[in-house]
Amino acid sequence: MEILCNIFLWFFYSTLAASTVALLVMTIQKLFHHHLSARLQHALWLIVLVRLLFPDLPNSSASIFNIALHIKNAVSIIHLDEYHSSNEISRNSEEKKIQQNDLNMATEKNHAMPETLSVQEGAQPLLSFSDQYPLVLPIISTIWFGGTVTFITYLCSYLLRMRKRAKRLTPVTDPRILSVLEECQRKFDIKKPVPLYTGDYAKSPCIFGLIHPWIFIPEAVVKELTSTQLLHIFSHELAHLKRKDTWWNALSSFVLAIHWMNPIVWISIKRMKADREIACDAYVLDVLGENEATPYGLTMIDFLKLFASKSAHPQLLYFGRTTNQNEMVRRITMIKAFKKGSYKFSALAIVCMIGLGAATLTNAATSDPASSSDSAAQTGGDQILFDSSHRVYNNLEKAVKVSPTAFKVPDLPELKLKAVRLDLTGKKFSGVAMDFRRDAMTYFDVVVIPSGVEHNDIIWTQRQSSEIKKETLNLNGLKILKLTDNEDSFSRSVYFWEEQGLQYKLDGPASNSQQEMLNVISSMKFPDKNMLKRYKTDDLFKTPVYDTEDLRYAQDSLGFAPKLPLQLLGTFKAIGADVYYRDTDHTSKGFFVRYERTNKQAKFKESFYLDQDKDTSMFQAIKKNGSATFERIDGQTFNVKANRLQLEGKEVFKTEKYKIDEALSSPDEHDNISYFWVENDLCYKVTFIEDIPQQQDIVAELIKAQSVDEKN
C-alpha cells in the first residue's frame, strides 16, 4: 500500500503542475486568440501534454514553478524560526559533545557504538509513512489506481475491437476514388501507400493506425460525394497523418487514463482536440491553396448535413465529427479568414514557444550557493531529514550548496580536503571550517566567519604578551594580520584578513613558511566546478546524513540501500544517521541510525541504535556458537549468550544483557541488549540501551520496513 500511495502522490504533484500549465495556456489563448494562428494555438496544448507525460523535468531558474518554491521557502522560514527558537538551548549544549565524539570515534576499531555518539537534532519525520499519509490517502490511491486500470483496459480493448473490425472492412477498388487519394498523397508528399477501406462501421471518414495507418470512408460517402469533395476529405485525413496527430491523439488518451481524476485535464484534452481539427484545416488549406478555402468550407457544411454522426469513438480522428456548434463556427470562421502562409510559424511565434517551454517544461531550480536564500541553508535544495546547526561534510560541493553565504577556498591542486564543517545559527551562516592537507606533516586550516563576529580564538588579537608578535602584511592590496606565538618551543603563526563581509583565518603547523601561507591566501577564490570536483575525501570515520541527497550518497558509498524509518510505533523517532567505517583500515562501511523516545523523558538521549552492513559473518558466528562476540575498548573480546527467536518470519538472535566494555565498564553504566538478523545478504543489528518493553515490537517493525532507495 505504501508503494501505491507513493505512486499516487507522484501523480498528484505532477497533475497539479500540469494543471498550472494548462490554466496558463487557457489564459494565453483567451487573451491573445485574435493574434494566435490555428497551428500555434494547438502547439500550446502540446506543451501541456508533454508536461503531463514527463513530470520529472530539468530544473531551471526560468521555471514558473520557482514562484511556488519561493512561497514554500517563505513558509519554511516561518516554521524554522519557530523550530530553532524552541531548540536553540539544546543545540548549544550539544556542540562540545559533537566535537568530542568525532575524536573518540576515530580511535575505535570495530567497536560497538557508544552512547556518546554525536546527536543530530531530529527534524520533522518527513519520510514517515504514518505521519505523511493520512488515513484517507490509501483509499483515494486505490480509487485512482482502479480508475486508471479501467481506462487503460478500455482503450486496449477498443484498439483490439478496431483491429478486428478492420479485417471485416472492404478495400476500396473504385479507380475514381483511388486516383483522388493518390493525388492527395502527392500533394502532401506521402510516398508510403495508405490503404482505403469502406463499410458501414461509421458515418464519417476517419484515419486509424499508428505504425500502419489506413483511412476509412463510409459507403454513403462513396456514393454521394464528388471528386472535389473527396479531395477535401482525403486531404484532411492525410493532414492528420502528416502532422502526426494519430500519435498525439493516442498519447492524449493515455494521459487521460492516468489523470482521469483531474477535471482540468478533461477540459484540456477536449479543447486540444478541437484546436487540433482547426490546425489540421489550416494545414490542408496551406497545401491546397487559399483559393480552396471556400470550397473546402462548403464541403464540410454539406458533409455535416448529410453524414454527421452522434456516436463517439475516442481513438479516431474524424473529418466532420463536431457536435458542438461553437467549435463548428470556429472552424468555418478560420477557413473563411485563411490566408496563405498563416499555417507557418513566424520567428516571433518560435521565440515565444521556446520561452514558454523553458518556463513550463522545467521544474523549480535549487538555490545557487552564491545567491541562495536563507531557507537553502536548512535544506541544501533537498528534503531535510536531520537538522543540525553544525554539519560535517566530506566534500566541499555539498557544504557550498547548503551554505547561504558564498565563501572563498584555496585553489591549489596539491591540497587534499580532510573535512568541512559548516556552522549555521538558525537559518543564517555562522561560519565554515575547512581542513586541508598537502602531506602527512603539512596542513592548512581555513576558518571563515561573518565580519563583526569574534573568532573563537580572538584571544590571539587581544593578548598583550610580548611573545605575541603582530605584523601587517600587504598581499596585492589585501591587508593581512599575521600573529606569531613565540611562547612555545615552536614559532607558530596565524593569518587574519577580511574580504566582502567575511573574516578569514589561515592556520597551520610551525613548519609552514610564511611564503607557503601567502601562497594559500593568494590562491583563495570562490570555488568553481573543478575545485568542487577535486575537494572530496573518503577519510572521515563517519559521514553524517542530513538530507535526502546525503542519503543518496550513503547508498552509493555503502553499495546497498539502507533502512531508515523515521518513526517507529509512534513513540520513537530517528534523530541521526551516519555512514561509518567499521574498522580503522577503512575496508568496510556500515549505516548507523539513532533513535530516541518522543512520548516521555528517558534516562538516555538515545533509546536504541540500528546498525546495518554487508558483513554477515557475526550473524553466522552467533548462529553457530550461540553467543555474540564483542570487542572492548582495550581490544580484548568477550562473549554474550544469544537466544534464537522467530519474528516476522525471520530468524533473530537476542543477546542477554551486557555492558559495552564488560569488566572495564563502570557499575552504573547502562546495560545493552542486541538483536541480530539477516535480510537480502545484509546484517542488521539493533542495540537497546534503555530497557523498554517494546523491544521485539520495534525489531519486528524494522524487519518489515522497506529499504530507502533514494536513487529510484
Image (cartoon, rainbow, N blue to C red):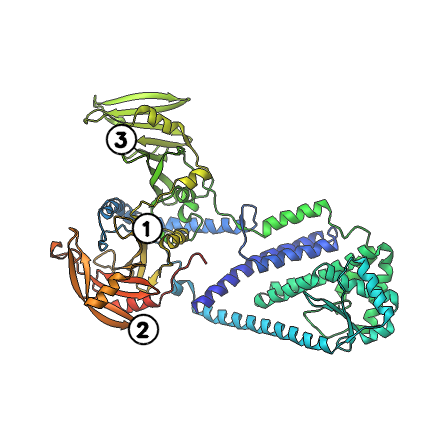
Residue named by callout 1: 86
Quick check: 403 above or below 33? above
Disc number at residue 68? none
Q: Residues within 10 Å of mark 2 (few under 14, many from 20)?
A: few
Give the distance between the C-alpha atoms of the residues marked 2 and 3, in whole angstroms. Answer: 58 Å
Compared across the picture, whether 467 is left or right of 285 comes to left
Asked whether the beta carbons under mark 2 and mark 3 sit within 8 Å of each other, the answer is: no
- As helix, strand or loop, the secondary structure at mark 1 comes to helix
Q: Earlier in the sequence, mark 2 or mark 1?
A: 1
Percent x, y for residue 382?
Answer: 43, 51
Asked whether the beta carbons under mark 1 and mark 3 sit within 8 Å of each other, the answer is: no
Q: Earlier in the sequence, mark 1 or mark 3?
A: 1
Q: Earlier in the sequence, mark 2 or mark 3?
A: 3
Q: Is 431 or 249 nearer to us in this picture?
A: 249
Q: Is residue 49 visible?
A: yes
Q: Residue at x 51, y 48 (%)?
A: 365
Compared across the picture, whether 11 is left or right of 690 comes to right
Residue named by callout 2: 649
Give the distance between the C-alpha atoms of the residues marked 2 and 1, in whole angstroms. Answer: 43 Å
Percent x, y for residue 472?
Answer: 33, 21
Q: Residues within 10 Å of mark 1 (few under 14, many from 20)?
A: few
- As helix, strand or loop, the secondary structure at mark 3 comes to loop
Q: Is residue 384 visible?
A: no
Compared across the picture, whether 211 is left or right of 674 comes to right
Q: Residue at x 62, y 59 (%)?
A: 49
Residue named by callout 3: 509
Percent x, y for residue 520?
Answer: 37, 29
